[in-house]
Image (cartoon, rainbow, N blue to C red):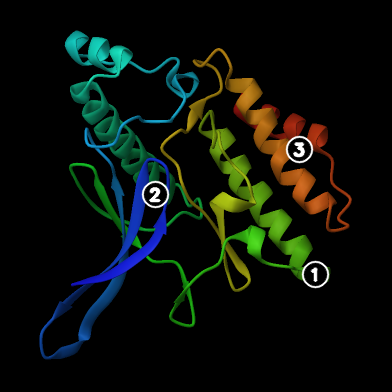
Amino acid sequence: TELGVLKTGKEADVFLVERAVPGDPSQQVVMAAKRYRGEEHRSFHRSSAYTEGRKTRNSRDARAMAKKTAHGRAVAAGQWAAAEWAALVRFWLAGVPVPYPVQIDGTELLMELVDVDGEAAPRLAQTRPTGDLLVSYFDQLRDAMLALARHGVAHGDLSPYNVLAAGDRLVVIDLPQVVDVVANPTGMDFLMRDCRNVCSWFAARGLDVDEHDLFAELLASAL
């Protein structure tokens, strides 16, 4: 059962979906359905810089994406959905704090709804943590970034807007653009940008953190 829109974005919208067995309250769960737009969307904004080092097997699809035809936009949407699904599965199994992946159907991803007391968890940017909670949040995010680095990748678009605060627990979201820090020529730049975005937010709230120290720590784990 569709319950409405949770969030809208440039390339995808997130809906609330209830999956249930009628008459059995114990068999009911609300999930998040992320739906990438296809050819009806005029343009797909994800930068091609994220996909450097990735392969597109079908040359016709590659040409269509380069020309941004209707077919190319549909292919791009499907590829981003598939990339995010693969990242969710890979990192969930590796213990990275990401939403539990349920299923993929074309350009729709069904995943765990990260919530707080039954309500969708806010983005980290919407919270005002202080003291021990602020320290804990940074430690959790650094650990998540280290876990990604050990897989040789960076989130690529990490910021307080792509992290959910579920009480005292952080969950990293929006993973279609995960960047290989070795295969991608600008991988190190994306890794540094993630460090800058994260450290700037925590430093602005009084935490003594340094983006260059974090970058060096991640780099040591990635290589």
Task: Compare residues 97 and 65 and report the one nearer the observer.
Answer: 65
The residue under label 3 is 214
Which marked residue is nearer to the observer: mark 2 or mark 3? Answer: 3
SS type, badge 2? helix
Circle on res. 170: none
The residue under label 2 is 93
What residue type is disc 3 on?
A: Leu
Q: How far apart are marks 1 and 2 (CA)?
A: 28 Å
What residue type is disc 2 on?
A: Leu
Q: How far apart are marks 2 and 3 (CA)?
A: 24 Å
Asked if residue 162 lies left or right of residue 73, the reply is right
Q: How far apart are marks 3 and 1 (CA)?
A: 20 Å
Q: Residue at x 38, y 46 (%)?
A: 88
Characterize the local packing of mark 1: few (<14), some (14-19) or many (20 or more) Cα atoms within 10 angstroms.
Answer: few
SS type, badge 3? helix
Q: Is residue 159 above or below residue 74?
A: below
